[in-house]
Image (tube, helix red, strand yellow):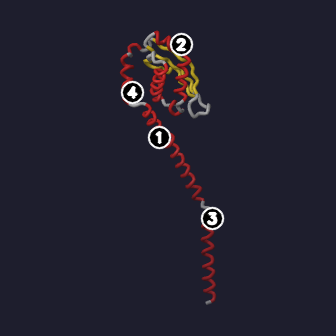
Amino acid sequence: MEKIIDEKIDARTEEPIASSIDKKGFNIKIVMFGIPIFVVQLIAVYYVTANILLNKIEASHSSLTQTPAEIKQEAPANQAKSNELGKYVFMVEDLIINPANTDGKRLLMSSLGFDVSTEKDNQELKSKEPLLKDAIISVMSSKGMSQLSNTAYRDTLRIEITKKLSTLIPSVKINWIYFSKYILE
């Protein structure tokens, strides 16, 4: 009987020791499955944030800066003078612009052409070229790389530059702005 009791005691003491060793040991399944799954989730979250959410935020921001009514009012004015487009174009060559939030690490080089109705307006722009350049740089440098790299956003840039120039030089009517050079580096 003493042997049976000793065997039961030995069996009881061995079980907790064996189970405690299994619990304290390193689980290789965590390394093989857990870490790769975590990395895949991290990449998915980055992709969703960078490509989908930021584009929606920028689209809503650009729609807030200009209402559809303003776009509709400006479109007929441009269409009415479409037969005169390209007759008088004043060029501003090779502006180097530092976009917002880039700390000088990224640059935009751009050349713009301003289509005006008369030779008088063309001469007016020529005489006020430093004012014109400053207005362009101030509008474009206030934009981030995501906005400037979006080709659909260039129409918004045209409208913003036209509005800024209409407040600075009200005597000149700009029909259209052409981007002849637009290089992001």
Q: Quadrant of residue 105?
A: top right
Q: Closer to the N terminus: mark 1 or mark 3?
A: 3
Q: Please tell me which residue is depicted at 36% across the width and 17% down the height of the picture.
A: 80
Q: Secondary structure at mark 3?
A: loop
Compared across the picture, whether 25 is left or right of 111 comes to right
**Which numbered tag is attached to residue 52?**
1
**Which numbered tag is attached to residue 153?**
none
Q: Quadrant of residue 66?
A: top left
Residue that extends furthest to the top in the rendered view of this protein: 119
**Which numbered tag is attached to residue 127?**
2
Give the residue type at disc 1.
Ile
In what quadrant of the picture does the C terminus appear?
A: top right
Give the residue type at disc 2.
Ser
Give the residue type at disc 3.
Gly
- Residue 28 image offset from top left, x and y in percent: 60, 59
Task: Measure the C-alpha gap from mark 3 to mark 4.
Answer: 67 Å
Task: Measure the C-alpha gap from mark 4 to mark 1.
Answer: 25 Å
CA neighbours of label 1 inside 10 A, class few (<14), some (14 to 19), many (20+)? few
Label 4 sits on residue: 71
Q: Closer to the N terminus: mark 2 or mark 3?
A: 3
Q: Secondary structure at mark 1?
A: helix
- Residue 121 image offset from top left, x and y in percent: 46, 12
Which residue is at the front of the view, 53 or 16? 53
Label 3 sits on residue: 25
In what quadrant of the picture does the N terminus appear?
A: bottom right
